C-alpha cells in the first residue's frame, strides 16, 4: 500500500506533531522511530521543500511542523517524498478466449476501484487524525488495565 519513504515521512511527522512547538533533531527522530538517519535527513529535506516542515540550524535547531497537523493531508506527504500512487496495469491474459479476457477486465476494474479508494483516503486523511489515533493507542498500550478492542 504505502511505500517505505512515505511511511518514514509519516513517522517523522508524527514525532514532530507530538513535540508541538519544540524542534526535533534528525538523530532524535531517528532514535525514537528507529529509522536510518541518512534516509530520514533526505526525507525531511523533501518535506521542507514541500512546505510541510520548517528547519532551523544551530545548536537549538531541528525540525518542526510548518503548518497545523490538521491541514496536512497524507497525499501531500506522499507527493513530497516522490511516491505517487501507481495504478497497477493488469497483465494481459495468456489465452485469447473470452473467459480470460472477461476475467482480466473484471480484475482491472477492481484494481482501478482500489486505487481510487486509496487515493481518496490519502486526500481526506490528515496528519492530525493519525496523531489522535496515535495518542489513543499510546493510552491503551501504556495502561495495563485498558480494555483492548
Image (tube, rainbow, N blue to C red):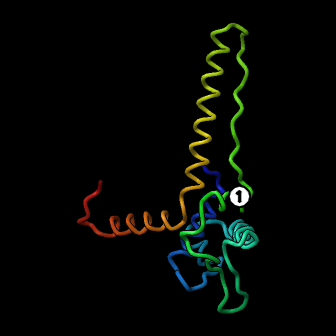
Taking the spot 72% from the left edge, 61% from the top edge, the residue there is 81
Q: Quadrant of residue 72?
A: bottom right
Would you place residue 123 above or below residue 21 in this image?
A: above
Q: Nearer the viewer, residue 104 or 138?
A: 104
Residue 84 coordinates in the image, percent (x, y): 71, 51
Q: Nearer the viewer, residue 126 or 148?
A: 126
Please name the residue that numbered disc 1 is placed on.
Answer: 79
Taking the spot 44% from the left edge, 67% from the top edge, the residue there is 132
Taking the spot 64% from the left edge, 81% from the top edge, the residue there is 25
Residue 79 coordinates in the image, percent (x, y): 71, 58
Q: Quadrant of residue 116?
A: top right
Would you place residue 81 above or below residue 62 in this image?
A: above
Residue 37 coordinates in the image, percent (x, y): 68, 70
Neighbor class of circle 1 (other Cα within 10 Å; few <14, some 14-19, many 20+) is some
Taking the spot 67% from the left edge, 88% from the top edge, the residue there is 61
Q: Nearer the viewer, residue 105 or 2?
A: 105
Please indicate whether residue 87 sits to the left or right of residue 121 in the image.
Answer: right
Amino acid at each position: 500500500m504505502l511505500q517505505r519513504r512515505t511511511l518514514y515521512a509519516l513517522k517523522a511527522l508524527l514525532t514532530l506533531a507530538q513535540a508541538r512547538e519544540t524542534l526535533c533533531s534528525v538523530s532524535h527522530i531517528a532514535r525514537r522511530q528507529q529509522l536510518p538517519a541518512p534516509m530520514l535527513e533526505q526525507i525531511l529535506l523533501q518535506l521542507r521543500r514541500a512546505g510541510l516542515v520548517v528547519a532551523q540550524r544551530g545548536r537549538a535547531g531541528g525540525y518542526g511542523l510548518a503548518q497545523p497537523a490538521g491541514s496536512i493531508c497524507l497525499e501531500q506527504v506522499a507527493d513530497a517524498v516522490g511516491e505517487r500512487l501507481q495504478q497497477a496495469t493488469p497483465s494481459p491474459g495468456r489465452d485469447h478466449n473470452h473467459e480470460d479476457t472477461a476475467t482480466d477486465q473484471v480484475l482491472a476494474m477492481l484494481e482501478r476501484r482500489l486505487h481510487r479508494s486509496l487515493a481518496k483516503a490519502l486526500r481526506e486523511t490528515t496528519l492530525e487524525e493519525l496523531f489522535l489515533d496515535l495518542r489513543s493507542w499510546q493510552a491503551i498500550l501504556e495502561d495495563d488495565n485498558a480494555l483492548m478492542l
